[in-house]
Image: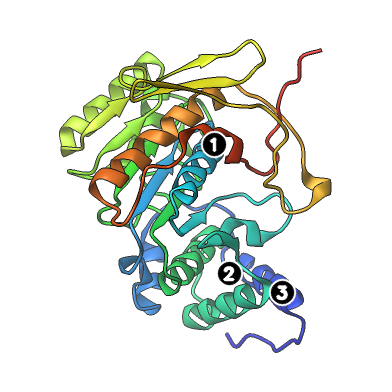
Amino acid sequence: MTPPVSGDDSVRAGAALERLAALHPKLIDLGLDRTRDLLARLGNPHHRLPPVIHVAGTNGKGSVIATMRAMAEAAGLRVHVYASPHLCRFNERIRLAGSLIGDGALADLLEEVETANGDTPVTFFEVTTAAAFLAFSRVDANLLLLETGLGGALDSTNVLDAPAATVITPIARDHEHFLGSDIAGIAVQKAGIMRRGVPCIAAAQEDDARAALKDHAAAIGAPLGIMGTDIGWTLLDDGGVAIELDGGRYPSRTGPSRGASAGKCRSRRRRPHRRHAGNLGSRPCKRCRQDRVAGTASPPCRRIADLASGPARLDRRRA
């Protein structure tokens, strides 16, 4: 398939996204073979990425990634982010070294991937994930924060051999048509992002989910840490959270999100899973700082919760 030529970058990008969405009859068709085949046609860009922290789970993935990004950038790192879905524009899914991908770069990228793929059936998420990996492989960065789309084991992002760390946020019933309704079974799917010898940090879980994560980690030899032991949090009277880390206590200020792409998209919320985001996000960044990511420094922890933000985050305001 040869992409048409248009002078307006946003129009080109939008048209490419529409064409890519039509390549597969299903919006979701879990599996890794199509993604691997397309990546091979693109020269396997997923083999040329900076250290990756791979995040799965049901609730709080965006909040954890926002926290980790704030920590890493406060430490002076250049950070890539892949997250979905987007709120206002597709560009929000791909952040290159701290900045959202531009319309021109996105249009060029999508058309390049479209040409490499041809008319081969591939889902929208698979082809756009491949495009994101290609973009990340071409821009220098110290860290990539990678969010799964659905599940984990069969999610298109799960093609990496050895991420620096993996994170599993609180697990609940979601996408039951694809993942089933059994919490333990859902946890096994999320645990599919674990790798032998790669540390995994998991949020506090329901009993069945926790047992499934422990069993899977033991079976493959993945070091697993579950929150509630060496890192903790306290809910403050004003609705904020105090993160307890390395013997220190760091209160966070609540307030509106500053991360939306446009002012009209900004809103505020607070959900229970966000109480875990700060300390869950801090652990893998700390591990990477110590073991996997060169040239880093300890970030100013007191600023992290204020810097972390995400589109459509809401805060419950007390009267």
Report crowding for label 2: few under 14, some 14 to 19, many 20 or more residues within 10 A (C-alpha).
some
Q: Residue at horizontal 49%, vertical 53%?
A: 29
Q: CA distance from mark 2 to mark 1?
A: 44 Å
Position of residue 266 relative to residue 202, above or below, is below
Image quadrant in which you'd find residue 114: bottom right
Q: Is residue 171 left or right of residue 47?
A: right
- Residue 262 visible in the snapshot: yes
* Relative depth, front residue between 158 and 60: 60
Quickly name the residue at label 3. 15
- Residue 123 visible in the snapshot: no
Quickly name the residue at label 1. 303
Amino acid type indicated by mark 2 = Leu
Element class at badge 2: loop
Q: Is residue 174 left or right of residue 290?
A: right
Q: In which quadrant of the rendered image does the N terminus lie?
A: bottom right
Q: Is residue 304 left or right of residue 49?
A: right
Element class at badge 1: helix
Quickly name the residue at label 2. 23
Amino acid type indicated by mark 3 = Ala
